[in-house]
Image: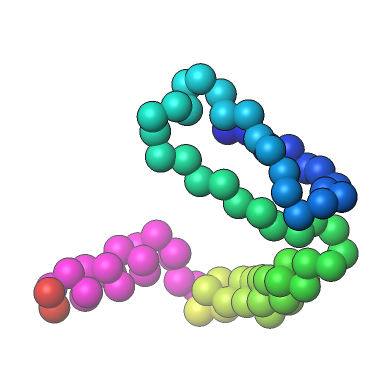
């Protein structure tokens, strides 16, 4: 994986693809970093609101998750 954080000065940017990635599908993402990213603060808010929600009912997360998946598998 290659990760590079830049501050572009134009709308065009040229990247060099490593030889081991040639003839393969690759994903190229362009995301803002820094305080402008409001999605991050919303995500943090959701995490804070839901933290420990399963522990209040003494639910063991892995067995609960298996049960939910089994219910879906039996329907299909």
Residue 33, percent across and down?
79, 56
Between 34 and 6, the one lying in front of the other is 6
Decide if residue 30 is on the left or right side of residue 11: left
Give the magenta-colored segment's residue range.
58-74
Relative side of 63 to 40, left or right: left
Q: Report the residue at 73% width, 38% height from top.
A: 4
22 or 37: nearer the viewer: 22
Q: Is residue 36 visible?
A: yes
Could you say where residue 41 lies in the image, as x and y percent from the top left? 77, 71
Classify 42 as above or below 25.
Answer: below
Tell me if residue 47 is in the magenta stretch: no
Can you see residue 44?
no
Q: Residue visible at 66% across and 54% down?
A: 30
Quadrant including the C terminus: bottom left
Residue that lies at the very extreme toward the top in this rendered image = 19
| Residue drawn at point x = 45 percent, y = 71 percent | 59
Q: Main secondary structure of the magenta part?
A: helix
Q: Tell me: residue 28, above or below residue 19.
A: below
């Amino acid at each position: 994986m290659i990760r590079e954080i830049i501050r572009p000065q134009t709308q065009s940017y040229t990247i060099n693809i490593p030889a081991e990635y040639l003839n393969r599908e690759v994903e190229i993402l362009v995301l803002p970093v820094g305080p402008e990213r409001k999605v991050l603060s919303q995500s943090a808010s959701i995490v804070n609101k839901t933290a420990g929600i399963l522990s209040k009912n003494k639910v063991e997360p892995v067995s609960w998750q298996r049960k939910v998946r089994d219910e879906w598998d039996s329907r299909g």
